[in-house]
Amino acid sequence: MILSPVTLTGRHVRLEPISEAHFDALARHGADLDVWRWMPSLRPDPRESVRVWCDTVMPMQARGEMAAFAIIDLARGEAVGGTTLFDYSEAHKRVEIGYTWLAKPAWRTPINTECKYLLLRHAFEVLGLNRVQLKTDARNERSQAAIARLGAVREGLLRAHMVMPDGWVRDSVMFSIVAAEWPGVKAGLAAKMAR
């Protein structure tokens, strides 16, 4: 099975399959270097970071290797970031949420919480998976805190995991949520979104 494009809609956000039509809005909202600081697609020009991100995820989506989404802020009616489901294993019933970025004004808003809620619900309730994992640069404390707030369990450190564009050898922190934890995580996310 490949990861098929799907649209997921909530109250604040719609996740729709990424396309070139999203690029202008993404380039506008991704124009802050802070957004890309810990990302492998970091380039000196943030607009180029958006282009590298799109040029990475769109071919993978076309090959069925990932489901890549534009994160649509329903209040604005435009794309304010992107995310993916990737590293899917049908045999082992797992997937990873990653390649995620959001415009700085969307940080710590219902957009990110609902985005993760929609992806997790799809993974556990539609795809019937046992595990969803997330990882981040060990230096990115903001991202680690956000992942922990979802209810994910920190599993450990992947040492010398990636070489970043500036040559830095990145350690990555791995988190996961497993199917048995999903009801509690789902309730926690629903309570956060109700505030």
Image (cartoon, grey):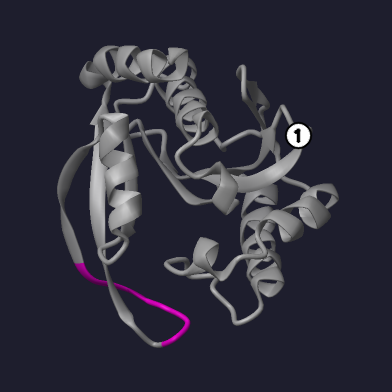
Q: Position of residue 44 (x, y in %)?
A: 60, 82
Q: Position of residue 179 (x, y in %)?
A: 27, 21
The residue located at (70%, 49%) in the rendering is 62
Q: Position of residue 68 (x, y in %)?
A: 62, 44
Q: Relative to 32, does residue 114 appear above or below in the rendering?
A: above
Q: Under tag 1, what secondary structure?
A: loop
**Location of residue 29 by image quarter:** bottom right
The residue located at (25%, 44%) in the rendering is 175
**In the current view of this chain or complex, which residue is farthest to the right?**
21
Q: Quadrant of the C terminus?
A: top left
**In the current view of this chain or complex, which residue is farthest to the bottom?**
167
Q: Is residue 185 left or right of residue 153?
A: right
Most common secondary structure along the magenta stretch: strand
Q: Which residues are magenta?
A: 159-166
Give the amino acid at mark 1: Arg
Q: Position of residue 180 (x, y in %)?
A: 21, 17
Q: Does the segment drawn in magenta span residue 164?
A: yes
In the image, 4 versus 10, the foreground residue is: 10
Q: Relative to 176, does residue 190 appear above or below in the rendering?
A: above
The residue located at (69%, 35%) in the rendering is 72
Residue ID for mark 1: 76
Q: Does the segment drawn in magenta span residue 47?
A: no
Q: Is residue 60 visible?
A: yes
Q: Relative to 194, does residue 106 appear above or below in the rendering?
A: below
**Location of residue 132 by image quarter:** top left
Q: Is residue 135 visible?
A: no
The residue located at (78%, 48%) in the rendering is 19
Q: Residues within 10 Å of mark 1 (few under 14, many from 20)?
A: few
